[in-house]
Amino acid sequence: MIGFLIHPRVERSLPSLEAARAVLREAGIESWEATRDQRRRLPAGTRLLVTLGGDGTLLDGARLAAPLGVPVLGANLGRLGFLTELEADDIAGGLQRYLEGDFRLDERLLLEVTVGRGDRMSRAGLVLNEAVIERAGSAALVRLALAVDGQPVGTIDADGVLVATATGSTAYALAAGGPILEPSLEEILMVPMNPFALTVRPILFPPRQALTVELTRGPGVLTMDGKVGRRLRPGDRVQLAAYGRRLKMVRFTSPERFYALLRQKLGWGLPLVPTPHADD
């Protein structure tokens, strides 16, 4: 069974979606369709999840699919589509290649986020891109105490901190001044957000270590992959650690396509002033 997780604004009568349905009917494969707001878990027997939307829809699908080991194939019907593999007109062809076994699986690290208040710890969820701990509704900076595997790292005054995977290094973390990481890397990236100190800079942690961020002056808010997770108050602790399973992403292109995407989607390495022609 193959599932389609569809952005609410995508028309079900889209010709490319109907062509994809036809490929599955011809192959005798059952399918299901749902918007990302309708689906909280994948039906039993789902062997592939196709996301139709943008990167946000793929992020939603990743949280559903990764715990079950179900691969995700992203189709871009949005704007940027940095994480997706297919464009709208390629969905049927991509499904055909998947059914023929003409693909590879790209594994990506996810972070498991846990929030502690007093003696109680509760699981907040999974992120593929990033988790952000930041100030909530106030012009004042928050104070955050950082620890790795229980060992203090330091305390910073800032708008917040952003903890990202290599996948997320090209998203919010990049806008916050973090480095770009090749997506197969499994390091955990911490990027301070407007710190009130010149020496506070991004740090990379190995995936075997758990990072804890304690809000010592607030209030604050935890946002996960762009969605508000919960409000934080002084004394709350947010722990971020590598999740035990990797997200499997269906790819038809080589890993080196990542660098082409940096140029095409983000403009990395392109000259600010175009190179003049010889006859100019």
Image (cartoon, rainbow, N blue to C red):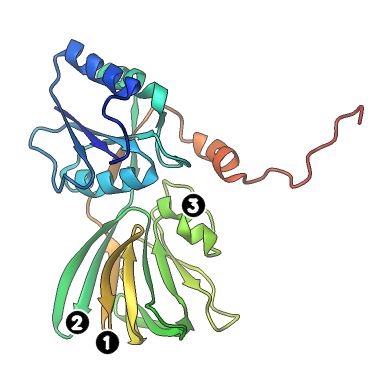
Amino acid found under the numbered disc labelled 1 = Gly
For disc 1, the neighbor class at 10 Å (few under 14, some 14 to 19, many from 20) is: some
Residue 29 vs 227, above or below: the answer is: above
Which residue position is annotated with label 3? 170
Outermost left residue: 44
Residue 182 vs 113, above or below: the answer is: above
Outermost top residue: 26
| Element type where label 1 sits in the image | loop
Amino acid found under the numbered disc labelled 3 = Thr
| Element type where label 3 sits in the image | helix
| Element type where label 2 sits in the image | strand
Outermost right residue: 279
User: Horizontal and vertical percent for residue 188?
Assistant: 39, 61
Label 3 or label 1, whichever comes before in sequence order: 3
Dots 3, 1 in contact, CB < 8 A:
no
Which residue position is annotated with label 1? 235
User: Horizontal and vertical percent for residue 45?
Assistant: 9, 32
Dots 1, 2 in contact, CB < 8 A:
yes
Amino acid found under the numbered disc labelled 2 = Arg
Residue at left offset 32%, top offset 39%: 9
